[in-house]
Structure formats: structure tokens, C-alpha cells
Image (spheres, coloured by chain):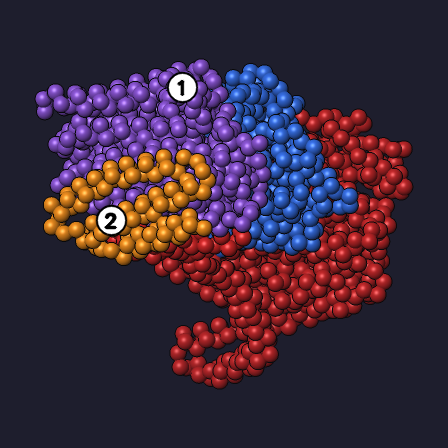
Chain colours: A purple, B red, C blue, D orange
Amino acid sequence: MFSFASPVVDFHALAPELVLAVGICLVILVDLFVPDHRRWVTGTLSGFVMLAALLPVVTLSVLGDDVRSALMDGELNQGITGRYVVDNFALVMKALFLLSGYVVVLLSANSIEEGGYNQGEFYTLLLSSVLGMVMIASSRDLVSLFVALEFLSIPAYMMAAWKKRDRKSNEAGVKYYLLGVFASAVMLYGMSLLYGLAGSTLLTDIAAAVQLDGDKVGVQVLGIVFVIIGFAFKISAVPFHTWAPDTYEGAPTPVTAFLSVASKAAGFVGLIVLVFIAFPLAQDVYRPFMWVMAALTMTVGNLVALKQKNIVRMLAYSSISQGGFILMPLAVAFTNGNQGASLRAVMVYLIIYAATNLGAFAVIIAVSRKTNSGEISSFGGLFSYAPGLTVLMTIFLASLAGIPPLGGWYAKFGAFKAAVDAAGGWGYSIAVIGAVNAVIATAYYITVMREMWMKPVPDGDTTPIKVPASLQAALAICGVLTLVLGVLPGLIAKVGDITDLTGALLP
Amino acid sequence: MFAESTEAAGWFLENAWLIPLIPAVAFFLILGFGKRMPRGGSEIGIASMLASLVIAAGTAYQWVQRVDAPVAEGEHALARGSFGFARTFSEEAAEAGHEVAPVISTLDWFDIGRLHVSIGSHIDGLAVTLLLLVAFISTLVQIYSTEYVRGDRRYTHFFASITLFSAGMLTMVLAPNMLQFILGWEIMGLCSFLLIGHWWEETANSKAALKAFFTVRVGDMGLLVGTAALFALFGTMEIGEINEQAANFAGDNKGMLLFAAIALFIACIGKSGQFPLHTWLPDAMAGPTPVSSLLHSSTMVVAGVFLVARLYPVFHVGLDINVAGQSFNLIAVIGGITVLIAAGLAFVQDDIKKVLAYSTVSQLGYMMLGLGVGAWTGAVFHIFTHAFFKCALFLCAGSIAHTGSHHSFDMKKDMGGLRKKMPVTFVVWIVSTMALMGVPFFSGFFSKDEIIDSAKHNHYTVFYFVAIIGAAMTAAYMTRATYLTFFGKARGGAAHFVHGHDDAHDTHDAHADAHGHDAHGHDDHHAPAHHSAPLPFAKTDSSWQITVPLIILGVLAIFSGYLNAPALGIHWFEHMTESSIGAGSAMSVPPPPEFSWAAAAPGLLLVLAGFVVSLLISKAVFGEKKTALQGLTQRNSLLGAGHKFLVNKYYLDALYENVIVKAVAYPIARAAYWTNQHVLDGIVNAVGIGGKRTGELVYKYVDQGLVDGAVNGSGATARGAGGALQPVQSGKVNLYGALLFGAAAVGALVLVLVNS
Amino acid sequence: MIQEQQWLLSLGTFLPLVGVLVMLFIPKKDEVAAKGVALVTAIATLAVGIYTLVQFDYDQSEKLQFFTTNKWITPIKATYTVGLDGISLPLYILSMVITVLVMVYSWNHVPEPGNTKAFFILMLVLQTGMAGTFVAQDLILFFVFFEVVLLPMYFMIGVWGGENRQYASLKFFLYTMFGSALMLVSFIALFVVTKNAPGVNPDDANFSFQWFDEHGRDIARDTAIWIFAGMFIGFAVKVPMFPFHTWLPDAHTQAPTQGSVILAAILLKLGTYGFVRIAIPFLPQAAVKWAPIIGVLAVIGIIYGALGCLAQTDMKRLIAFSSVAHMGFVMLGISTLTDLGISAALFGMVAHGLITGMLFFVAGSVKERYHTLEIKRLSGMLLQMPKMGWILGFCAMASLGLPGLAGFWGEFPAILASWDPLSGEGLPYGGLSVGLYQGLTIVAALGTVLAAGYLLWLYQRTAFGEVSAEFAGTGHDAHGHDSHGHDAHGDDHSDIHDVNTFEWIAWTPLLIAIVVFGVVPSLMFDVMDPAVSLITDRFGGK
Amino acid sequence: MLVNNFLILGAVLFSIGVYGVIARKNAVLVLMSIELILNSVNINLLAFDRINGTQDGAVFALYIIAIAAAEVGVGLAMVLLIFRNRKTIALDDLSEMKG
């Protein structure tokens, strides 16, 4: 018989999660006790919670331990160590999620308040979702991966449908929900197969079992493919992207920003963990599969984006295609010893992409406060009455297009470099496809620039836009990051030092 | 700037670079200050040309001394005011015989890789001849122009351009290397554009300018390519070295030398108006007459001939000239065709300047022919003599138009009977015409005869006949032109002039409109109603600025020939210049044949015949006819007795004109002219139009359609593809789910199959 | 490498950005202050440039001077490395000069729709990008600067351009993006391949030019050819070479005058500079294989550009097409892989910058006065604006390669070189087909004829002749000065006036430079030649 | 072996669930089909648990059951929301946004 004994808990390592958990409770409590007109306090509080959670992340990284396991084997229980770890990769990603969350709070402040939505609950959900993301960065086990994934997804489903009276928002939520649940169900089925093969949910054990040999290759392939799908859905890789445009368009804009950045990043974290720890020896499966996904994602996302009239929808497709670019190095990882470059490329891309894309959404939110429209044409003549916003939007779009000296170029550069580093047909071919797509992508970014700079104001209303302070802060953070990371990409050198994930190195 | 040579070759010889530099500086002075000068900048131009002339004369003098000086050991070889580098290509040559080394002064300009470029002067007999010639003629023409273009609205520009032109020609003449040569060559091209188009308000003029520049530029292709070929072949740009190496050419790469020679000759064809690129030259008469006189008779157009003469070893060796058994070569053929074609065309021109223009083309043909048959001295000497008399003829034409025919050049409409009123012009014209015809003891005789003689002597028999027939034709068309201009009854503008100024003024405007070919001064020539003072002995002739140059040129038209008169045993010119053709080399240019009257006789007889026939015809057609007709119309019926005779006379005219001339001469000449205008010129124009059409087609279909279309098309395709993909995004959850799972299933299936 | 005054190039490159920062704080309404700050910045930058010019050691022009290298993006081994040698110097200075002149010209020529401040800021940003490209000695740094110019130019065309500006600017942008995306892939491939080469310590690999200079030549030829292909497309679009040129006429035609000038004078040179500085020296084995293709495309460009010119009815578009032809000569020179050819090409780059820049200036001023550039509507410019007319004529002559003016020294040596391209026995990377190049030479020479054709045709139609009825009586008419007296010169006809003060200030330096470089080409050849030899030496040719 | 039959049962349930998601137009039915898949996963996990003799499968299954409950809660709430706004829960009507 078993007797239960609690494992040894490294509280410092778990501190970000704990801060967030406490913060969630705090927000709920505060929400209960403040009067309606002061509900904005919950937003402020959420922001502080995010920043507070960032503190232990900083202290952990300053300590500089290579890796620490949050839960360690106690005297009686075995096999917990290494299921939930804190390494540099996890820390960087946690920081990214927390900062993105903070910016999303800034973005939400006014629109949620002015929309008359339930602020307290909204921020609670937002914090929960961020908690899920923070958790996924540390998960090295199928169970914790799954739990974290659901933890970040379920609040997101609700946030997507947050505008209760809005039919589009409902539709966005339902679509996201049904497909998300379906995808995670399929993923779970894959996970069950993997568990069956390995006899353990620990990723390193799975890696040992999934080597594409023996008589169960078919089951291995099925398991890998199904598991990848679950995360491919999150990153909206084609053909698992179908939810994204509809949801992005329908959801409240700050939520869209959140989904397109943080949620996507979380999906990538899951994929990275799987590829680097669970499947490094199964590259004959994930490489072609993800190669095709990457190529399709870039291309289809771009092509359809060309036709969009709605700016949010256009950005949705744009973020799909950006996902393709991020997928590119991952798809050819472990080819010709480029895993270090691949990992770096994905992480750098995610960071820069987050700053840039959130910035773009911030501008959209700011502009739509005046125009109340999501059409691209509503940006006409923006330069004449909001030059600052125009310049910022130009910076963000140009960065998304990958034009130096804005952040995006370095992100794309890293992705290309990792792909070329792979040095074979897989790498070169995807790099060329990527290069062509980079050009196509430019076409629709530039359409928006053209609208802002060169077209007349559609309704002739040129009263200046008043940008609330929180939005200004968000814009400043994103703008500065985009610029600085473009000119001095060496600043994210910490990321550059990470060449592999803990546990990825098999004996 | 230029280092003194160790052993002085003579100040002028070493500082000959001043000759082009002075007018070049003058050009900028005129542009900058000309308008503020009392005489609109013309004084600067003339002064600079005079200065150049003086230095050129000094250079010539010292060159003569140098040639005549006894050869001291090594002296000539060292006598090179070279700056920065000294090559000794002609040392042995200098020591080997009586050859006189050229004086080369250079200043390093720049190096690009193995291309060494210098500027400076290459003085030898050929260069000295041309220097003197160009400076002299330019001076005279500028003096002439002060009167001729007086009051022109771009008087200053005119002098600036014409001065720059001289500078360009002089730069080219003393070029020590091909780059400087091209420099001068192109500057001349530019100036010809500016000067031909001087009255650019009229489209015809600017079109003529365009045509001239463009046609010459077609030839320039050859210059560029030929120079490149020479550079690749010999690794140098220095003319002296090129000549040296070409003369001693023994490589197995003869084909390349041939190619270079042909390419360069194409440039000469363009510049010197040789068949088939001669059509720009008559059109170029749209420029003011002094321009025609300077550029298109005596200087610029001989640049092509000069190029052949300058690089004679290249052509001589490249084209195997004077190799035993050769009776044709490209230069001789082109030259010969040009002689005949142009002479034929000169018959049917009514415009006096066009007659002279075709005559120039024809004479240039002679020069080329001479070079083609190995008569280097004869050809160069013909450049020399031709310059004087052709310049004189053009200036006479200008004088007539300026004073006698109210700015018309139409011989049939506005001239005739001018000999009494314009004695100076008339005499100079006659003298020059005789020189042009090659009448013995006039300058043209000596030069042309040597070419003709050499053709025969060097076994280019066909070209001998071409040359003497050409000579006869020359005599004939010049006789016709002379008769039309100075004899017979005054017509049109001339009639007003001959019969009194008052009449002329009454109808002036009408004439100006009707004959506005030389359209200068539509506005301006009211203002200076009376010209400057004429010479005292020819009060009705043009003013002194015009007549004095005429007289000088007339004198030279006679006497310049005596510098090299084989008939009189004078070979001075030959002696002075012979070192210029790659001396002391393996190249064998046969010496000019000994002169004998017997050999010259057939040519002279043909000239005489041409003169007589033409005179008779002209008298009959142009002279008597007019008289008869006027008699018919003005006299009353009482004189009916003479009527029949006059009718008969007229019948005779008709016989001449209709049967002999129209049936025999005219069809040929006309056919030639038609060919010229429609085929050759047509081709030139068609090339122009065709080029433009091609451009339009290429632009419309290839560029905008194909290339750009491909680009835009790919954009459209991308968008189209995007549109095609949109239906996937149907908005229906079930389909999304099906897609999701379908893709997963297909992916998994494929991967399972591949991996197991 | 001469590592003295290491700050100099960085100062020269980034000084304009300081001006931009200052200008950000100037209120939009205060146009004079904005213009003033911008101009002062540009002049200060030029002063730094002139100081550079003075400090440059001309006896060692093949060496990189003012060289400095600093850490920049350590993870990818990219460094901030700048240096200046004889090849870069003329272009570096040219970019500064052009910026100042363009700003002077802009003083009272800010195109519609105004917004002076933004316009001047863009010019300063452009300046930084251009100067940086010419001094960068690190592939990544080069790439960044290369791309920095993209957006400002896009906006310059798109916001301040002509009627069809949006299409033109989009085309410009996408074309260039297309090229640079593939170029970037090539750069990375070059790095990866050199890094993984046998006998190389991967840790030594970096993105500095020096590294590629030493190791690029060891790449297997087949691989190198593919890498070259990517660079080729990137640079060829920028040049632009046939068949990647179609963005150019649109961009030039629609751009405001200032944009056209900068585009013609500097931006096109980024492409050719890339060939000379990167593609050819780093991948000599591929260059020898690519050269004939480049040569053929260059010559097609020459003829094609000329034919395009002949078909134009718009003056500015004609000038734009002439750029295609002229850059064809530059590329032909480069493709010979000889000292002479590449020197000629570099000279041609500067000359084309001066001359075509000037032509665009004139076209801009003509447009401003007549409100049209349709050739058939313009006539008799010499009568109404004699000085402008003569300047146009001067530039046309310079452009068609008249000896004694700058244009000639780009064209003629290129022809010379292409007659005698890299060839011979025992060359390390093989030679080129002499026969092919001689054929190309002849066709290229035909191009000079066509150049004369279209330029003179343009000149004859616009400058010569009587003033067309449409514009007669508007403004100064030199024709009737004396006879008509002054009664006809009312103030309301001041539309068409001759060259004004700002134009004189902006143009005179260019005009002088065209003459000076035409008369004393050694000024540039002497500086460039040693550096060019350094490149061509590796081919072992002449 | 007996456990293999459980795996087959799991596969069949999974297939039925997938079919339901794709073919059903009613939101609630789709939701139920997804539950079916989740349960097939649970059966799988437990079967493998038996085969492998470790506890991970059982623990995983417990987590899945818990989370499935949360998911269904959210899902039903959303279906209610839709029904309130549109008076229908047919999925085909949820296609306002497309393209």
C-alpha cells in the first residue's frame, strides 16, 4: 500500500505561479468589495500582480542556476523530479508571458471598462490564463503539459466570448471553444498512445520510447502527430488555423491581442518542449509534418491576408503567417546540429513578435476608439491627424514585415539562419519559401501603411485622437522594445546563451 | 605643368598644347563675359584663334627646322618633353634613317588598372599641317562671321561654340593617344550639333542638327569598339606606339587588326560623310554659312580622313593596302563610291550650299580613295589644299547670300549675273573653282593629281578611272553652279540686288519669307540695315570682314599647292610629313610616282571635257533660255521675226534639256538622288523612326506587357490564390473540425507509410 | 586596416539621426525651424564628410581606414564594423553632398502635400542608411543599412509623389523586399557554408567582410553559384538590371524631385556597390560563372533601356529609363572582372549619380513651372528659360557620354574593358569568353548611339523650337526682349521663370562636379584603383 | 489479450466521437461527441496503465475527468449564451464571420 507524503517543494522556483495564484484570489476578493465605479482597481491590481510575479522570475534568473526542479522527490515518493522544472528557457518564457499579460492589461483597461463588461471576472480569467502559460513553460510531463494547456485555454474561451451581447463575440467564443476542445481531445488521444508506448508520462521517458523503431512505429507516428496537433491548433498553424480569423475578429480586441501573442507563444512553448525533449529522435515524423505545416502556414496565411478588408482579421492572418515563420526553425531542428540556433530563433522570434504585435493591436485599439470601425479603410489619412500613432503603427508593421532596423528583421534573420543552418534540402527549401513569403507579407502590411500615409481621411473627421494613459504606456513599451531590439538585438543575449533544454540531452 | 625636355626640341614644338588650350579657355571666357564685351565676345574668339595661329605657325616653323636640321646622334629620340614616363619606341627608328621623331609632350592624366591615360601633344608633320590649317581657317572664318552673323540673337553663343569647336579639332589633331583623340572628336560633334542647330527655333534646323550628331554617333560606335580592339591588341592608347606596333605587326592575330581597322573606318565613314552615311552632311547646311565653311568643308569632316592618316599603319597593315596583287580594299571602295555618288548628286542641287556640300563629300571621297591606294601624302595634301578652296567657296556662297541674294541659297531662283556687282566674290569663286576642278597650277591640281597618279601607279586601276571620271564630273557640276550663280540674268533676290537696293527693300519681306532657308535674322536684320564698309575697289560687294578672308583664301587656293608640286619637282610637303606614318617600319608605303604630264593628261582632258560640256549645257539651259523667255514675254509682236528663231532656240533647249539632260543625265542623277533621298536617307531616317518604333513596341508589349505584366501578374496571382483560399474559411465549425482532423489523419497516414 | 579616428565614420553615419531627434521636438507648424535644423544637420554631416576626405590617407586607399569594430549581436557573430576604403569613399561623400543639395533644393520646393518636417526627417534617415551602407564592413550591418533606406524612400514616393504614387511606391517596396529577402538567405548561407567548411574552426566564423574575403573563395563552386544567385537577385533588383527594372520607371516618375534625385544618385548604387563589395570578391569562383550572365543582362539593359527611352512621352520617365541603360554600362564593367572594368563601373556609378541626379532636378523644376512633363507639350524651353535650357543640354550631353564630362569615364573604359575581359591561361577561377564579350561590346557601343538618339531627341523637342502656344506669354521671353519692350511682362505671368537662387545653390556643385570629374577623372580613379586591384587580384587577370 | 480489447474500444469510441464532431450540426451534440473522445482517452489510459503497471495513466485519467467537467461547464454556458442571443444552437448559423 502507498502512504502519501508530500514531495519536497522548491518554493522559490514556484514563486511566480504562487504569486499569480494569490493574485487571482486577491482580484476576486477586491472585486467583491469595491463599488462598481471603482472596478478599474481590479485592472490595476492585475497589472501589479503580473509585475509582482515577474520579480521571482528575475531573482531566479539572477541566481543563475542552470536548472531547478520545483517538485523534488521526497523520502517516500519517487519520480516527481524533472516533471516541473525551472530552467533558463522556462524563465525567459515566463517573463515573456507575464510582460505580455501586463501589456494586455494595459490594453484592456479602457475598453473593458468602457464596454461595461465585468471587469473583475475578466482580469481573474486573464490572470488564470497567464498562470496556465507560466505553468506550461515549466512542464516536462504530459500531465502537467495538458493541465497547463487547459488552464490557459479555458479562460481564453470565455474571454473570447466576453462581449455577451455581441453576436460576433459569441460566435468567436463558441468556435474557439469547440475546436479547441476538439483539438485537445485529439491531442489527449495521442498522449494516451504515447503513454502506452513509454509507460510513463515523463517526456524524457517518452523520448526513449519514441525512436521510430520496433514494431510499433505506426502507433508512435500516430501519437506524435496527434500530440503535435494539439499545439498546432494553439499556434494556429495551417490547416489547424481555421478558428483563428473568426475568433480574432469577433473577440474583444485586447483579447485578440492576447490570443495572438501569449496564447500562441504558449503553443510554441509546448511544441518546443515536445520537439526538444520528447521527440528528438523522431525527426522523420515531426520534421516533414512541421515542414509542411510551416510552408502552408506562411503561404496560406499570407495569401488570404492579402484579401482582407478588416484590419483585425488581416492581423489574424498575418499572425498565422508569422506562426509559420516561427515554425520554420522548429521544423528543421536537430538537423545538422542546428538545434541551438533553432531554439534561439524561436525564442527571439516570440519575444520580438510579442512586442510588435501587441503594439500593433494597441494602435488599432487607440484608433478604433475614435473611428469605431475595424475596416482598413478607417485608417485612411491617419497621418494627418495622428502622426504619432501613424509612425508607431508604421514601426510595428514594418517590424512585422521584417524591415531593418526594426525588431522583426532580427527575428526573421534568426529564423532564416536556423533554417539555413540545417544545410540540407529541408532547410534551404523552407528558407526560400520563407523569403518569398516575407515579400508577400510586406504587401499587406504596406497596404495599411499606404492607407495611413497616403489616403484621404474617409469621413473627413480630423479631430485628434486622445490616447488614454494606459494605452500610451503599452505603446511606449512595445515601441521602445521593437526599436531597441532591432538596433541592438544583442540585448537578448541571455536568450542567445540557451542552446538546449534541460533533459533534452539523451544519454 | 609640363616639364622641360632635357634637350630642347624647340619651345613651340613642346608647348603646342597651348594651341587648343587657348581657344578652350576662350570658350569659357566668351560664355562668361562675352555678353558684356563691346563686340559680344567675338573679339575673344578671334584673339584666341590668332594666338593659336601664331603658336601653330611657330610650331610649323620649328618643325621645318627640325626636319631640315642635320641628324645629331640620338637627338631626336631624346627630344621629347615627356613628363612622368618616357618610352623609347622610336629611338631605333630615329637612328636608323632620315626619319624625324615626333615631339611628344605628355602629362599623366590618370591610370585605371593597365589603362594609362595622358594628355599632351604629339607633334609631327601631319599634326603640324592640320594645326596650322585649322587655326588659320578658324581665324578667317571668325573674322568673316563678325559680319555674317552680326546682330544675331545668339551672337555670343555662336562665337563660343565655334571657338570650342576649333579647340576640339585642335585637341584631336595633336592627340598623342586615342583618348584625347576621342575627346576632341566628340567635342567637335557636340559643337556641330550646337552650330548646325544654331537657329533652333525652326524645327528643320534642329532636326538637321540632331541628324548630324546622330549619324556621326552611329559611326562613333566604330571608334569606341575599334579603340577597344586596338587597346586589347597592343595594350596601349598611345598613337605613336600603336602605329609602331601595327607597322611591325607580325602577330597571328591579324583578324583582330583587320577588325579594328574596319571598326575605326566606320567611324570615319560617319564623320567624313562617306557613303553610305553621307546624308547628314547636306542637311547640315542648315547651319549658318561660316559653320558650313568651317565644319563641313575644311575641318570637322576631314577628321575621319585624319584618323585614317593618323593611324595609317593600322589601316595599311590591317587592310593589306599596297600588298602585291590587291586591287580593291574597303577604304578605296568606299572612297571611290563616295566620289562618284556625291559628284552625281551635286548636279541636281538648286541650293548652292548643297552643291558645295556634295562636292565636299566627293572630295572627301578622293582623300579616302588616296589613303586606300597608298597615296598618303597626296591625301593629306589634299586635305590641306581642299581646306582653302572649299572654305573659300563656302564663304563666297555666304557672301552672295548675305549681300547678293537676300539670304537665299537657291541658285535658280535668286541668283545669276552677280559677277559684276560682286567682283571680289566672283574672282575668289572662280579661282577656288578652278582649284577644285584641278586645273593645272591651281592648288587642287597638285594634290588631286597625286592621288590619281598613285591609284594608277599602285595598280588600283579601277579607282584610277573612278578618280578621273570624278574629276570630270567635278568640273562639270562646278561649271553649272558657277554659271547659275554669276552668269546669265539675275533672278529673284539677285535681281533686286543687281538692279538696285531700293527695289530689294520694297519686296524684302516677301523674299525673306519665300526664301527663308538661311533663316537667320528674321527679326534681326532690320536693325543693321547697312553693313560695314566694303573694300574700296569693290563697293557693291560684301563688306571687308567678308571679302578680306575671301581674298586671302583665294590666294591660297592658288598657291598652297606649291608646297608640294611634283609637276614642278617640289616635294617639300612630303618631306615635312613623311615621318608621320610609322617611319622606319616594316610597312611599305610605295613612294609617290614621278610626275609626268603624260600621265596627268587623260585626267586633265576629261576635266576639260567636263567643263566644256557643262558650260555649253548650262549656257543653253539656264542662260539663253531665260533671255529668250524674257524676250518673248516682254517684247511686242513686232519682233515676231525673231520669234521663230527664239522658239527654235527654245526647241534646242528643250532638246538639250528634255532629250539629253532629262533622258540621259537626269534619270541617272535623279535616280541617284532618289536613291539617296529615299533609300539611303530613308534608311537613316527609317533607322531613326524604326528605332523609335521598336522602342515603342518593346516598351508597350515587352516592358509594360511582359516584364511588368509578369510582376503585376504574380501580384494578381497571389491575390487570386488568396481569394481561392478564402472559401476554406467557410465559417462553419463542422467543416473546420473536419479539416482539422482530416489533415491530421492524412498527415499521420502518410508518415506512417513512409516510416514503416 | 588603419584604426585611427575610429569615431569618425560612426559620427558621419549617425549624425543625421541626431538631427532627427532634435526635429521630433520641433512643432509641426514651425517649418523654418525644421528645415533649418535639418539643413544644419546635413551640412554638419557633410563637414564631417569633408573632414574624412581630408584625413583619408590616399596613399593607402586600398586599406580600410578609420576602421573600428565593436560587439554588436554576439550570438550570431555579427559585429559593428565600419571602415572606409577607396571604393567606398566617393560614394560615401556623394551621399552626403546629395543630401545637402537636395535639402537646399527643397527649401522652397517641398512637394504636395507639404508636411515639411516629416519630409526633411525622411531625408535625414535616408542619409544615415546610405552612408551606413557604404561604410559597413559586416554583412549583417550592411544588410541593416541596406534596408533602412527602404521605408523612407517608400514614404517619400508614396506620400509626396505624383498621381500614380501609390502603385509606384508599392512596386518599389515589394520589388526591393523580394530581392533583399533572397539576398538575406544568401548571406546566411554564405556564413553557414564558410563556417562548416573543413579545416575551419566554426567558432572563428563571423559576419565581417574580412572573414568572407578570406574564406568565401574556398566554397565549392556549385554551392557558391547558388549563393551568388540569391545575392544576384537582391542586388540586381536594386541596380536595377533587366529584367528586374520595371519598378524603376514608375518609382522615378512618381517620386518627388528630391526622391528621384536621391534614388538615382545614391540608392541605385547600393546594388552595384553590393556586387563590387560583396558578391564578386567573396565568391570569385561563382562570379566567373555568373559574369557572362550579368554581362548579357547588362547589355540587354543598355539596349532595352534606350529603346524604352525612345518610346517615352514623358520627360521624367525618359530619364528614368535612361538609368536602366546607364546602369547597364556599370554592370557591364563589373562583369568583366577586370581592374579597368570595375574602376569604370565605380566611376560610372558616381557619374550617373551626378548627371542623372541633375537631370531629375531639372525635370522637377520644369514640372513645377509648366505643370507637365509631356515632351510634346514642351517646346522652346531655351526661349523662356535659357539658363534652364542650357543646363538641360549640358546634362544631356554629359549623360550621353561626351568626353570631357563625367559620364564618359564610366562608359568608355567599360567598353574598353569588356572588349578584353578576364581571360588567359592559368587563372585561379578560370576566365571569361572573350568572343562573347566582344560581341557584347559592339552591342553596348550601339547603346551609346541610341543614348545620343534619345537624349538629343528629348533636347531637340523640349528646348529647341518656338514656345508652344500653350505656354507662350507666360513669363520671361528672351525672344522679344528688345522689340517688344517690357510692356508684356505683367506680374501675373511670373509662373515660368528661369533658374532661381535655391536651384542655383543646389545645382552648381553638381554641374561643377560633372565638369571636374570629366576633366580630372584621376581624382576618383586614383583613389579607387588600389582598392579595386585588391578585388581583381584574386582573379589573377589583368 | 483482454486489455487490447479495451484499446479497440477506445479507438472505436474515438472514431465515433470524431464522426460526431464533424457530422453533428447541433452544438450540444458536438459537445457530447467531444466528451466521447475524452472518455475514449480515459479508457486508453487505464488500459495502458494496466499494461505498463505504472500509476501515471490512472492519475492522468483523473485529471482529464476533472478538466472535462470544467470544459463542459464553460461549453454549456456558451451554448446558452448563443441560444439567448440567437434562439438557435445550430452550428451552421454560426457563420457570420468567414473568408
CB atoms at circles 2 and 1 under 8 Å apart? Answer: no
Q: Secondary structure at mark 1?
A: strand
Q: Nearer the viewer, mark 2 or mark 1?
A: 1
Residue located beneath label 2 in the image: D32
Residue B215 position within the rendered picture, expressed as x and y whole percent measured from the top left: 56, 56
Residue C146 position within the rendered picture, expressed as x and y whole percent measured from the top left: 48, 34
Amino acid at pointer 1: Val
Q: Quadrant of residue A38?
A: top left
Q: Secondary structure at mark 2?
A: helix
When the figure is inspected, residue A86 is found, relative to residue B249, above or below; the finding is above
Image disc number at residue C91:
none
Residue located beneath label 1 in the image: A8
Residue positioned 76% across, 36% down in the render: B103
The front one of B752 and B746 is: B752
Q: Quadrant of residue B24?
A: top right
The front one of C238 and B605 is: C238
The front one of A375 and D40 is: D40
